[in-house]
Image (cartoon, helix red, strand yellow):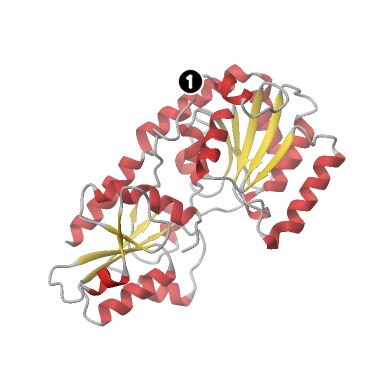
Amino acid sequence: MRYSGVTATNRMVAPKLARQFRAAWFGPDAPDGMARMTIADLLKLWRRRTPLIWHARRNNEMIAGVLLRSLGWPLKLVFTSAAQRHHTWITRWLIRRMDAIIAANDISASFLKRAATVIPHGVDTDVYAPPADRAAAFATASLPGRYAIGCFGRVRAQKGSDVFLDAMCRLLPRYPDFSAVMVGAITPEQSGFANDLKQRIKAAGLPSRIVITGELEIEQVQRWYQRLTIYAFTSRNEGFGLTLIEAMAAGSALVASRAGAAELVVEDGVTGVLTPSGDVEALVSALEPLMRDPGLAAAMGARARARVLEKFSLDAEANAIAGVYRTLV
């Protein structure tokens, strides 16, 4: 199992579900507070009479569920999809064999070609929370200025890393109180893309004010959220875009491209500002008023936090998934 956004969302919600059902995690990266299931444990369930929920998030997990059920295992198969694209023939074939489908948003649901329950991802609002003192949190980063603007996710074109950098190269010279941070892994196949970004930062004379951290431990990522005054979500396409609600939960003002679940999550002009994907001019225009007036950004961040508490908590996601489970067993 790759530790990606798919795995991350599953790891967060699974312990919440384990409080409502007898549940176990099969595979690596088991979350704290969750029982682990080995292959030996799995084999013991073969002759069980009452049905079990097998919740898959990827093709290989669906394939395993379909295969086990064909061998007589009493499984009810559930699949969660966040993809916003037409599925391959094998994925479509597997989806038709699921007992229930969950989609992360309405756009993802539209590509499934069968009925699905839309359940947005949630975030742990105790972990992703505003700092007691954002200025003090920023000071721990040892960056120039007084405020930070961030863009998180793997450094690649799909995430709009280049769009964010272009906007920063234009805006930071105008606003010396701001520094920028890009938090996310640089995979080997993206090293050329990342090196080009670093060269552009150097050419702009901003190496001390635009930081690319590389991959960090999750606790370090959470601390970076608390240092931000503004968060820029610049993806060109996304399944959901968990960083949207993580940044909002931490009280950052949000400027988001219309990708993933942005239009579901963000109330344009209230809890964030929506921009066209890949549009540097629009991103600059949306960010500049917030950089000009950090008080305006702080007020938007407070509204964003309230929005997540109301609509996108981890408990809300877990309860909705539990409702799907109960219809099956």
Q: Is residue 222 above or below residue 306?
A: below
Q: Quadrant of the C terminus?
A: bottom left
Residue 256: give x, y in percent of width and height: 58, 39
Q: In this view, does 133 lie above or below 6?
A: above
Residue 43: give x, y in percent of width and height: 25, 74
Residue 243: give x, y in percent of width and height: 52, 42
Q: Which of 303 and 130 is in front in this view?
A: 130
Question: Residue 276 vs residue 217: left or right?
Answer: right
Residue 253: give x, y in percent of width and height: 56, 29
**Quarter holding residue 264:** top left
**Quarter holding residue 36:** bottom left
Amino acid at circle 1: Ala
Q: Which residue is drawn at 76% across and 29% down?
A: 172
Q: In this view, does 53 lie above or below 242?
A: below
Q: In this view, does 255 lie above or below 88?
A: above
**Quarter holding residue 298:** top right
Q: Nearer the viewer, residue 293 or 144?
A: 144
Question: Residue 13 vs residue 270: left or right?
Answer: left
Q: Can residue 262 be seen? A: no
Q: Is mark 1 on a helix, strand or loop?
A: loop
Question: Residue 41 vs residue 158: left or right?
Answer: left
Q: Name the residue under label 1.
A: 132
